[in-house]
Image: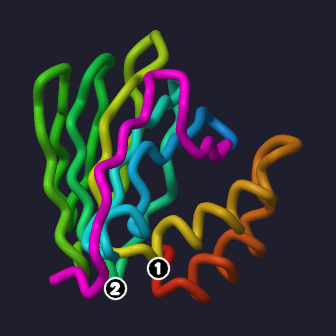
Amino acid sequence: MPTKTLQNVVVRKDQGRIYPTGDGALTFKISAEDTGGVFAFGYSTTEPGGGPPLHTHTHEDELFVILEGTFEFTVNGDKIIANAGDVIFSPRGTQHTFKNIGETEGKTYLVVTGGNFEKFYGRYSAEVADGKPDIEKLVGIAGEHGIRMG
């Protein structure tokens, strides 16, 4: 339960905190701070062939809503093809990844519990601002935020 008094938040379609991912971008529309640490809400774009390495969150749950494109999710070893309108929930402790297997940019909404993920993205996006990330740095940053790679 939030411990502070929350305020209404309005974020216009061209607003939000944008973080480059190296193969697209994640825009946090509603931050965990806005929700008293309960969740964050974002809009993500992923180029064809793009997606994160296999990983496991220890602090947060993730909910993906596919808006456009075709994605292949791997969740605890199971392959799932997801298209526009599909929803994927990955609770903390679940090993997962996704890849845009379509020929156009994929778009998703993302709901993440807690505020730790935004802190990770703040650090991670600085590493990919000029291109693809250094994998060793990514693994180190992820580990600092309770995300296990592989």
Label 2 sits on what residue type? Thr
Residue at x 45%, y 36% (from the top left corner): 44
Q: Is residue 90 left or right of residue 37?
A: left
The residue that appears at 29% across and 67% down in the rendered structure is 6
Q: Nearer the viewer, residue 93 or 8?
A: 8
Sequence-wise, the earlier of marks 2 and 1 is 2
Quick one: SS at disc 2?
loop
SS class, disc 1: strand
Judging by the rendered image, the residue that carries numbered circle 1 is: 147
Is residue 119 shown left or right of residue 29?
right
Q: Quadrant of the N terminus?
A: bottom left
Using residue 50 as the reference point, say whether residue 78 is left or right of it: left
* Residue at point 41%, 30% (across, down): 100
Q: Which mark is residue 58?
A: 2
Residue 145: x percent and y percent?
A: 54, 84
Q: Position of residue 60 (x, y in %)?
A: 30, 75
Q: Position of residue 133 (x, y in %)?
A: 76, 55
| Distance from Cα at disc 2 to Cα at disc 1 | 6 Å
Name the spot of residue 5 as percent of width and height, x first.
28, 75
Above or below, 65 relative to 36? above
Magenta residues?
Answer: 1-21
Question: Does the residue at mark 2 contact the one at mark 1 (Cβ under 8 Å)?
Answer: yes
Colour scheme in use:
rainbow
Q: Main secondary structure of the magenta part?
A: loop
